[in-house]
Amino acid sequence: MSAPQPIWQLFKKDLLLESRQQYTLYGILLYVASTIFVLYLSMGEPEENSWNGLFWIVLLFVCVNAVAKSFLQESRGRMLYFYSIAGARDFVLSKLLFNLFLMVCMSLLSLLLFTLLLGNPLEHLGLFMLITCLGGGSISLVFTFLAAIAARAQQSTALMAVMGFPIIIPQILLLMKISTVAFSSVVQAGLWQMVGLLIGLDIMVVLLAVILFPFLWKD
């Protein structure tokens, strides 16, 4: 069996389960819609800096709800079964890939609801959509990696929050800085360096997951 095939099979398994259960999609949709509606009632259509900050904060909590459960829902019996049919690297890469796909979809859905309820102060909607996909994928990689570590420990949810705070806050600030280019016709200096830094962080997270997860798998 070739190396990519187990990854693809595990990815399809997660996609099939998600399409059958659908509780994540409806739960996130309810959370995003209610949160944005409350923001609309309290703030109306905020100015662009507030709009940008609120969007990434909402996206952060969407990721926590959508991605954090990826490893927590796997029972010990399932893990033993996956151990027998695939390697640790295949398993963690399939989780990273599926959660990236899921979070990109949720990010675009959140952007749609934001523009419908809180207005559209964007000068470059297409560019912001690309940044949203990049940012949503980056956040999902971090929380998938943290969920993989936290799932092997007691009080896993609290552990993930403690570990994630010093990692995700600089990433959110970086995403907010990058996304400001979509609100102005002037391209800010150092934009592509910040994008490169974000992509570099994503690559580092993937490499750490591939290197460290096999040790957790054996536990």
Image (spheres, grey):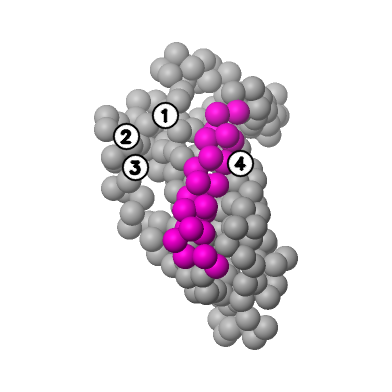
Residue corresponding to mark 4 = 102
Could you say which is closer to the camera, residue 31 or residue 136?
A: 31
Could you say which is closer to the camera, residue 14 or residue 208?
A: 14
Q: Residues within 10 Å of mark 4 (few under 14, many from 20)?
A: many
Disc 1/disc 2 C-alpha distance (Å): 8 Å
Disc 1/disc 3 C-alpha distance (Å): 11 Å
Q: Are marks 3 and 2 in contact (CB under 8 Å)?
A: yes
Q: Position of residue 3 (x, y in %)?
A: 66, 32
Q: Is residue 67 left or right of residue 25?
A: left
Residue 25 lies in the magenta-colored region: yes
Q: Position of residue 53 (x, y in %)?
A: 47, 66
Q: For the residue labelled by badge 4, is the local secondary structure a helix, a strand or a loop? A: helix
Q: Please state the extent of the stretch shown in magenta in the rendering.
A: 22-45
The vertical placement of 152 against 58, above or below, is above
Residue corresponding to mark 3 = 160
Residue corresponding to mark 1 = 72
Q: Is residue 156 left or right of residue 127?
A: left
Q: Are marks 1 and 2 in contact (CB under 8 Å)?
A: yes
Disc 3/disc 4 C-alpha distance (Å): 19 Å
Residue corresponding to mark 2 = 156
Residue type, label 3: Met
